[in-house]
Image (cartoon, helix red, strand yellow):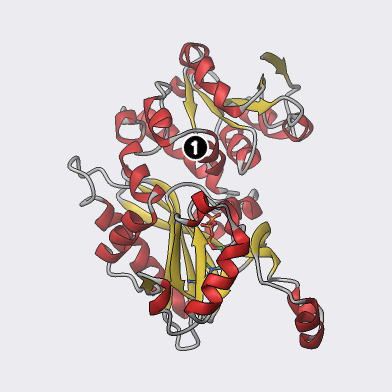
Amino acid sequence: MGAQKSKPGRAAKAAGATVANSYSRYKIATLGSHSALQILHGAKQEGFSTIAICERGRERPYQSYKVADEIILVDKFRDTVKLQQRLLKENAVLIPHGTFFEAFDLEEFEKLKVPYFGNKGILKWEADRMLQREWLKRAGLILPKIYEKPEAIDGQVIVKFYGARGGKGFFLARSAGEFYRKIKDRRTKEDVRAYIIQEYIIGAPIYIHYFYSPLTNELEVMSFDKRYESNVDSIGRIAAKDQLDLGLETSYNITGNVPLVVRESLLPEIFRMGEAVVKASKTLDGDGKGIHGPFSLETVITPDLKFFVFEISARIVAGTNLYVEGSPYTELRYGEPMSTGRRIAREIKDAIRQNKLSKILD
Ligand code: ATP
């Protein structure tokens, strides 16, 4: 492990104005991957010092974009566990994103002592697809049907493997026969046990980026994206006949994100769904704290404008990386560049000022 100091960037200079504030003794830290550029940039805009924990050899973007005051190099992200004393001493607050949950087991993660932005109690409700479903059902959302066994398949389904982040290896089927034929080539026997068979919804996929603040008790709609997935988003570039000749299978491996605004008349329903998810989250665990901070509903909108929700991400999603300078929606609300990363830092700053850090850190 080693540490490097970067030269102050544009955001750092802007933040230079904020001296001797009570929050200036806190540092914002995250793993160098996923949405770290945005998170650290936003933290600097709000006047925090920042730490990027990078895997050796993958630190280049965090140096080049000058978002990190300090870069700590580790061999593997898991080694962050060994940095705990140092991070505690530096008054670091960890901001989680998708890479944390690939790097650590849930139990390991729950045991981390470094203050964490979010509610750890909610993590297991997101990690398990069936618990997640229970949460979304309690919120009264429309969910794609789940088939208990392949023999029950009576329409187009998508078969999803547990832990297959980013849609890797998913496949489509329309009958039990097709399911068994395809699953045979896919995975080892061990993996094959962990899948769900879900109704495939034909429509427009839209990812909604929310932020809920327990300080203001308000839900904000920050932005939207759609995904750019390989190969599903490029199959249309070759003729149907060629697709058949090549024996192509659709896959949903995420490679990037595309910006989006929604038809304005959909917004009331989008707010309603987000508020219902927050309300339902308060019933999940005994302490009633529920979810706070950023989260995302992954939806498909059918031609009759019904939202089917196929997943929730209970943290910042990479689609928000589009909006380092804010989205059309955050411009309406804030009138200054407000990325989701910056919104997180603003929340921490407000909590420090109001002496309510315990409400937002775990
Ligand atoms: P991540 O955790 O990164 O969101 P994942 O591995 O959990 O990814 P999903 O987001 O569940 O994967 O699905 C991957 C892609 O498959 C989606 O972006 C969407 O295009 C498509 N998809 C998933 N479920 C459905 C569904 N029920 N109907 C139609 N399309 C779907």
- The residue located at (43%, 31%) in the rendering is 109
- The residue located at (45%, 55%) in the rendering is 194
Describe residue 91's horizontal placement relative to residue 268 as left or right: right
Describe residue 21's horizontal placement relative to residue 170 as left or right: left
- Image quadrant where residue 103 sits: top right
Q: Nearer the viewer, residue 353 or 84?
A: 84
Describe residue 228's horizontal placement relative to residue 45 as left or right: right
Quarter of the picture holding the C terminus: top left
Expressed as whole percent of the image width and height from the top left, the position of residue 174 reads 52, 81
Q: Nearer the viewer, residue 306 or 266?
A: 306
Q: Nearer the viewer, residue 344 or 166?
A: 166
> Would residue 134 be visible to someone looking at this image?
yes
- The residue located at (67%, 34%) in the rendering is 11
Quarter of the picture holding the N terminus: top right
Residue to which mark 1 is pinned:
96
Q: Name the residue type under label 1.
A: Pro
Above or below residue 31? Residue 128 is below
SS of the residue under disc 1: loop
Above or below residue 91? Residue 277 is below
Q: Nearer the viewer, residue 129 or 86?
A: 129
Confirm or reject: label 1 Cβ below 8 Å from ligand 1.
no
- The residue located at (42%, 28%) in the rendering is 108
Expressed as whole percent of the image width and height from the top left, the position of residue 57 reads 77, 28
> Would residue 226 be visible to someone looking at this image?
no
- Other-residue count near label 1 (Cα within 10 Å), few / some / many at <14 / 14–19 / ≥20: many
Above or below residue 101? Residue 140 is below
| Count of numbered tags | 1
**Farthest-out residue, left:** 286
